[in-house]
Amino acid sequence: MIVALIRTGLIELKRDRVALGLTFVLPILFFSIFAIVFGQTGSDGASRVNVIVVDEDGSDASRRLIDALAAEPAIRLRTRTDADGNEQPWTQDEARAGVEDGDVPVAIILPEGFGSTVGRFFGDVAPIDLLIDTADPIAGRLVGGLLQKTAFTALPDLMVDQGLSAFEEHGGPMTPAQRLAAGALKRFLTTGGGPIGEGNDSGSASDDGFEFGGPITVNTIDVHQSDERKKNPAVSYYAAGTGVMFLLFSAAGAGGSLLDEQDNGTLERVLTSRISMTGLLLSKWILIAGIGAIQVTLMFVWGQLLFGLPLTAHIPGFVAMTIATALSASAFGLVLAAACRSRAQLSGASTIIILIMSAIGGSMFPRFMMPEVMQKAGLLTFNGWSLDGYRKVFWNDASLVELWPQLSVLTILTIVLFLVARLLAGKWEAA
Amino acid sequence: MTEVLRITDLSRSFGETEALRGVNFAVGKGEWIGLLGPNGAGKTTCVRAIAGRVRPDAGVIRLFDTDVTQAGEAAAAARSRLGVVPQDIALYPTLTASENLQTFGALNGLSTSEARERAEWALEWTGLDGRRRDRVKTFSGGMKRRLNIACGVLHRPELILLDEPTVGVDPQSRERIWEMLGQLRDEGASLMLTTHQLDEAQRVCDRIVIIDHGCVIADGTLRSLIAETVGSDRRVIVTLDEPVGEGAFGATVRLNGTALEVTTEQVAADLPMVLEQVAGLGRRVEDVRIVEPSLQAVFLHLTGRELRE
């Protein structure tokens, strides 16, 4: 008897392709996506941080540092050219605006006098300003660390010169033996190898107890620091991420009412009344979008009440994004429902598709922290565009006009999805 | 009689299967017809074609003198005078009776106030007035069935397509349903009934259309169909207290234990003769039954006894 029941269960599983997919394919698919997202497979696929560098110094040292930064695989320097193809330098204001608007997460300002003071550990120095957008907390820290590293690797001679100069200025002249040791160290740093005591009778630097620690001076400036509306960027991000993901789930579930009505004969009855299939789909689309918009709004209101999410300060952008997102999600739900033949099939398909879209699109994990290829893939998803829009609203204070790329894509997506749903729903029309 | 529906040479195939092969019949104003046939005969396809849910390959459906096979406003207007009551309980289970009625009223073109007014009528008509605020999912099968019918006739259709209105309900609900439909008949509604309950069709229909293998194989009143098929002879069955021996009666009388059976067109003349013979044999009559030819006999005669899948 037990064997008979096991056999029956296996036959049922084998014949239910959705269940089979959920059991065996979905876990592997998810593992692969998360391995790509979190594992950063391959250096080419790793995330690169876009950075604007403003060179106000124009010195050899600043140019060497910029070249070294450009060579860093984790950084992509944002450049621009004029009509003749000549590179145009950025100004400090442009760099700040770029970070404030969310075009880049980080900007580096190399101030006038940077080259003449770099490497001084104390005294008068011209500090580098690192403008950061804390909406991307990783980028600022990454670039800050790389700045220290590149300064040491690209400007070792200047670091030693300036360091010793400062030392002599405050501590008195060095002895001949000390100068010899410093020269050896400088040669070592500039040539990049060889024993430090080579040609130096006084022994190795370590023997003499030299310490070469200490960073270049960097002022990290949060461009939104003074804005009370941006106390906690993560809250608005996760409200949007979670809200959009669950909006998709509820839209798919609500779209499934078509399948319920198909099963209990209500759909047939409704279609024998005066309403057309297009009218029926429109009514479902508006209803699901309305419910979805309320769902997302409740999420954000809750976020404001409990977690200080600045909803009331961003009403126009929020309303625009929420309406566009809900209309699009509603059309997506109708497509899924019209494409499936049963509730069970819809449930399986929507779970697979929505979880994958949410993972790639950034609902579960910020896209800016993903490998570059995944960031681009995220733009193929509904979630990617929607979350970008919410991020611009809540973090970059984007106006309605500035939301045009996201609103346009979501609107086009809505139209296309509705047309696809209408096409697929033809199966319910007069045969 | 003015016709509300005329179907001419209606054909429809699904792949290799010819569901309808030149179907012809009509429904007159105020007439009730039964559209009968074995499973897979083409009844459902025919009803769905009339309701606009199946496009015919060929033929014409004239509804209220409008060809509804041609799409357009005229066809839509004609179909708005049609009421469709499906066999399935096609209701919204989480809505109340009143809400369901108002929804289907609105879908069939009634204004909000009209829908509300007609819903009141329907609640009384169906005997569901006391359950108006209850969700349909809490209703019994008979209550759902009555509400299902009401939702199809709220907009006062002149022709009602009624598919198996009493399937799965108890005798009390069945009687109530036929009472309800009787009121519609009194108001002059035409009705096309699709059913396997042949006794009900026999009881309520003015005319019977039998369809099989996609063709109409019989169309007429019950009396005419009986006459044309199994004949109008009635069976007289007399049950005795004891069996009688072979040869006690003539060849026209069949013996089966204590029962003797005579098939005759002249019951009034033949029955007294049989009873006289029984008395002459010293037997006592315990029961007499006169069985008239039924629609079932006609149906089986025309469509055969083999199972249809």
Image (cartoon, coloured by chain):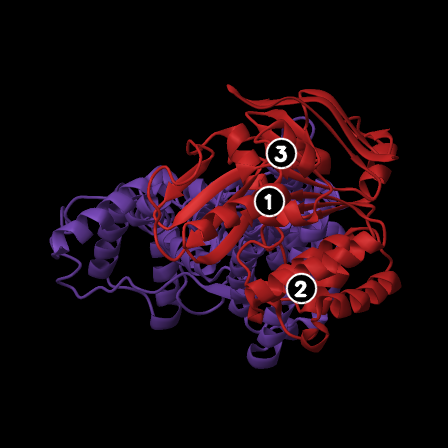
Chain colours: A purple, B red
User: Which kind of residue does numbered mark 3 sit on?
Assistant: Ile
User: Which kind of residue does numbered mark 2 sit on?
Assistant: Arg
**Left or right of residue A38, residue B212 in this image:** right
Which of the labelled discs sits on residue A1, or is there none? none
Q: Counting residues from the N terminus, which is met first, the one under dot 3 or under dot 1?
A: 1
Q: Is residue A21 above or below residue B97?
A: above
Which of the labelled discs sits on residue B226, or is there none? 3
Q: Is residue A393 visible?
A: no
Disc 1 marks which residue? B195
Q: Secondary structure at mark 1?
A: loop
Q: Are marks 2 and 3 on the same chain?
A: yes
Q: Secondary structure at mark 2?
A: helix
State if disc 3 and disc 2 touch (CB < 8 Å). Answer: no
- Residue nearest the viewer, comparing A256 with A131: A256
- Residue nearest the viewer, comparing A343 with B65: B65
Which of the labelled discs sits on residue B176, or is there none? 2
